[in-house]
Amino acid sequence: MRIAFAVLVGLVALLLPGTAAAVPPTNDAFGSAAVVGSLPYSDVVNTTDSTIEGGEPQFCIFMNQTVWYSFTPATNSVAAVNNGGTGFQTNVNVYRSVGPGITSLNFLGCSQNGSSVTFQAEAGQTYYIQAGILFGSVGDLHLNVQEVPPPANDDFADATVVPSLPFNNNVDTSGAGTESGEPQPSCVSGLPTGTVWYALTPSTSGFVSARATGGFSTALAAYTGSAPGNLNEVRCRVFNGLLTMHVDAGTTYYFQAGGLFGGRGNLQFTIDVAPPPVAGISLFPGDPSSFDTIQFFSSSFDPGEVGIESMDWTFGDGGTANGCCPTHRYLGDGNYTVGLTVTTFDGRTSSTETVVQVRTHDVAITKLQVPQSGNVGQTRQVSVGLSNKRYGETVQVQLFKSGPGGYEFVGVLTQSVPIRSGGRTTDFKFSYTFTSADAAIGKVTFKAVATLVNARDAAPADNEAISLPTKVNG
């Protein structure tokens, strides 16, 4: 009776709704991955009861439930995998198998929500595709695998010919692969992804600049030679950098462009005559005198991105120098033409000139006349005499007088100061009325400060004078 009752309970459990055991899809586990046959391939699997198994890898974004596919191509190709057609959010990861089991997988790339992950599939090598759901959504998951056709200039032998400069070409490298013997550029740690080729045979010798750009980081290398296995690298650049180099007339140069870190997609290749370096000069002070040691600076740069190797200076008075930042002093006033020639590491040159106007402006306070004594309320004259032997100047003179907390402003005068010889001065005449505060102290001291209005005084140490104290009576 007990056995019959147990059988009856089991039958009831199977018939009652909601009590049936969950049945995962047949390719729920890595070990039972569905086999992707010839391309194009499509599959639809219901993920309602799919699971995550122990040790299952997670990349790019966490997946709640997954299914697995294996793909072993018969020929080399570039494959694209996506979940297009799925009505909920998904992620797909692609791995290369390097040994037995789920722990021997090398991650190649991922994509989400219908976008494609592209990878180079080698004949006879097994790849695993892990497709999963995000945020708990379940239902019919679509998997699509198709071969991406290569661009016309995928192989070295089919390199796109550059007919003339400037040249610009756009190519989709999604289906580009790498061929046997293809060289690895010296500026990268591995062979670039999805490489394409260009060939240039210049009619004249000179310099060219090429660049590969895209929505991903790129590598660009230039070679001479006749086949992938016997190429000699000329130069290479990464991260969309400008590749500038010298070319000889009649020699064919091959340019290999591809992506870094698995980057593929639309790539733009441009090449043109290399720009010359740009020479630039700056200096300090900008209004030098014969008393100044001028600091010169090179603001030069190389738009060809090779770099400036040498800088040669001429100073217009017979002096010369090398390097970025020489100093120079002129012994007399005048206009001097300063020249700078810069040369890049690959031999391109450029020159520039600037005229340096050396003017030694210098006035001096040589006389400060004040009264010997004064009384409170009495107005007396203070005279400041300026000498000038170089250029006619406009000068501002400020007069100060001593007080309990230091010097206090009295007044300011501005006037022309012509060139005068023989010790003659131009006088600035101030009027000052003595105060009770002066009498409380018993004396007052005057200070005069001269400033050039439209120039810099080359020797300002003599632009200030302090008088002897004036006795002040109450």
Image (cartoon, rainbow, N blue to C red):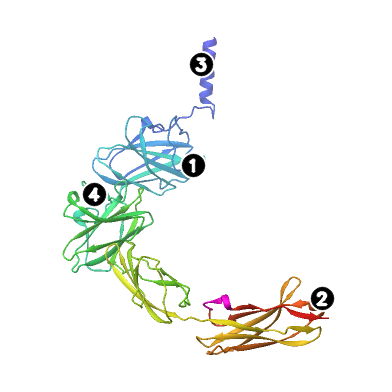
Locate the C terminus and report the quarter of the image it occupies.
bottom right
Q: Please, what secondary structure does the residue beneath circle 4 have?
A: loop
* Direction right: furthest residue: 474
Kindly report the distance in space between the C-alpha atoms of the residues bearing marks 2 and 1.
Answer: 91 Å
Sequence order check: which comes first, mark 4 or mark 3? 3
For image coordinates 17% across by 55% down, the residue present is 225
Mark 4 residue crowding within 10 angstroms, few (<14) / some (14–19) / many (20+): many
* Label 1 sits on residue: 134
Kindly report the distance in space between the C-alpha atoms of the residues bearing marks 4 and 3.
Answer: 71 Å
| Residue interval drawn in magenta | 457-462
Q: Which image quadrant for residue 376? A: bottom right
Kindly report the distance in space between the C-alpha atoms of the residues bearing marks 4 and 1.
Answer: 41 Å
Q: Please, what secondary structure does the residue beneath circle 3 have?
A: helix
* Label 3 sits on residue: 7
Marks 2/1 in contact by CB < 8 Å: the verdict is no
Sequence order check: which comes first, mark 3 or mark 1? 3
Q: Please, what secondary structure does the residue beneath circle 1 have?
A: loop
* Label 4 sits on residue: 183
Marks 3/1 in contact by CB < 8 Å: the verdict is no
Sequence order check: which comes first, mark 3 or mark 2? 3
Residue type (three-letter) at the residue carrying disc 3: Val
Residue type (three-letter) at the residue carrying disc 2: Ala
Q: Which image quadrant for residue 45? A: top left
Kindly report the distance in space between the C-alpha atoms of the residues bearing marks 2 and 4.
Answer: 95 Å
Sequence order check: which comes first, mark 2 or mark 1? 1
Seen in the picture, residue 290 relative to 243 is either above or below; the reply is below
Residue type (three-letter) at the residue carrying disc 1: Leu
Could one spot residue 168 in this view of the protein?
no
Q: Position of residue 122 (x, y in %)?
A: 26, 41
Q: Please, what secondary structure does the residue beneath circle 2 have?
A: helix
Say left or right for 335 vs 123.
right
Q: Position of residue 345 (x, y in %)?
A: 29, 62
